[in-house]
Image (cartoon, rainbow, N blue to C red):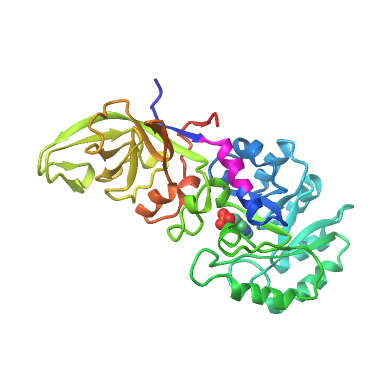
Amino acid sequence: MPRPIEALIHPGALSHNLARARAGAPDSRVWAVVKANAYGHGIERVYASLRGADGFALLDLAEAERVRALGWRGPVLLLEGCFEARDLELCSRLNLWHVVHCAEQIDWLAAHKTQQPQRVFLKMNSGMNRLGFTPGAYRSAWTRLNALPQVGEISLMTHFSDADGARGVAHQVAAFEAATRDLPGERSLSNSAAILRHGLANDWVRAGILCYGSAPDFPAHDIRHWDLRPSMTLRSRLIATQRLEPGDTVGYGSRYTAHEAMRIGIVACGYADGYPRHAGSDTPVLVDGVRTGTVGRVSMDMLAVDLTPVPAAAIGSEVTLWGCGPEVGGVPTELAIDDVAQAAGTIGYELMCALAARVPVHLAAD
Ligand SMILES: *Cc1c(COP(=O)(O)O)cnc(C)c1O
């Protein structure tokens, strides 16, 4: 028997979540953001569920090739654009749309030999200070692009730093609008948090994390609030149990001490599977669908859980690290990835992207 850990990808949840993006931006076209191998899910595994989107946005050219190999003939957008001049050949060959965020990318376009004018998304740095032209430099970049025979339609784009938090998006929207007021072209501003939290939708929205069933603004709101469903389950089983007496400790560094007699279970899941090592004791976990917590340090291949709330648990009991658990009394159970991430001092994005290659992944029946 293989080691009992596996990840499940839930097609029904992916299409449900994509429909939530559409409902939040009913007059917009929706990019399904599938960078980082579809946030760790696998581009090939999510494709059938997300192909109802208007386009796929990603940043690795090899991932763009994979989307085309799946038969997708619609828009594909490279979110960071080209990394060197010869990437433009692939853009021409695969008809990729690409972001232009710096003067060098315009130079490369000007030198590119193509019969086919390329569609570009000109990116403004409206305050994030990662990629893009400042509002003051934006218009001259647009004018330069617009004069190139290599360039067809120019769309206008920016990205928010605080759509999920207290600062919000208004200051960046104002900077963007002031600098683009009389420029033609389609607009793309919103990520998941801007769609859900601010109801902001222009010609194109960029829906990433919401497709995958994690709340972009957790803990202010959770996936139930936004009516999102987990698209990834990580589950395993108990491979041992131990009885502890008061004073007994658990795991490396003896980071947990039992204060009374208790039973713990040992789970076949560790940081080499992508489970966060920084998750301290009492990180939530389901055993046979019952919520309990971890005890002690996460090790490479194992972690320990408190079995006090699940006295019937034994070797073979199902353990849900995140996602969908078994039914209990006919009711499905669920553990949001955001709850686990918070206990480890991170965000759902990081956990799903970090699912390790050694974990077998299967498509769920739903
Ligand atoms: C990753 C990314 C997104 C998607 O962000 P989510 O928070 O996952 O919705 C949108 N736009 C750009 C430019 C990105 O890099």
Which image quarter holds the C terminus? top right
Position in image of residue 4 (x %, y %)? 39, 27
Any part of residue 58 in sight: no
Position in image of residue 283 (x %, y %)? 32, 48
Residue at 58 percent across and 47 percent down: it is 211
Residue at 82 percent across and 63 percent down: it is 110
Position in image of residue 64 (x %, y %)? 69, 45
Please tell me whether residue 184 is drawn above or below residue 319 in the rendered image.
below
Question: In the rendered structure, does residue 13 fall within the stretch colored magenta?
Answer: yes
Question: In this image, 166 relative to 290: left or right?
Answer: right
Classify residue 190 by image quadrant. Answer: bottom right
Write down the region rendered in magenta.
Answer: 9-19
Position in image of residue 197 (x %, y %)? 55, 62
Where ligand 1 lies, by quadrant? bottom right
Classify residue 152 by image quadrant. Answer: bottom right
Q: In the displayed orientation, state which residue is furthest to the left.
A: 246
- Counting the numbered discs, the total is 0
Which image quarter holds the N terminus? top left
Q: Nearer the viewer, residue 287 or 88?
A: 287
Classify residue 159 by image quadrant. Answer: bottom right
Residue at 88 percent across and 62 percent down: it is 149
Question: In the rendered structure, does residue 263 fall within the stretch colored magenta?
Answer: no
Residue at 32 percent across and 25 percent down: it is 316
Question: In this image, 278 relative to 68: left or right?
Answer: left
Give the dominant element type of the magenta stretch: helix, strand or loop: helix
Please tell me whether residue 292 is drawn above or below residue 341 in the rendered image.
above
Q: Nearer the viewer, residue 18 or 278?
A: 18
Q: Nearer the viewer, residue 38 or 209?
A: 209
Any part of residue 202 in sight: yes
Please tell me whether residue 40 is drawn above or below residue 222 in the rendered image.
above
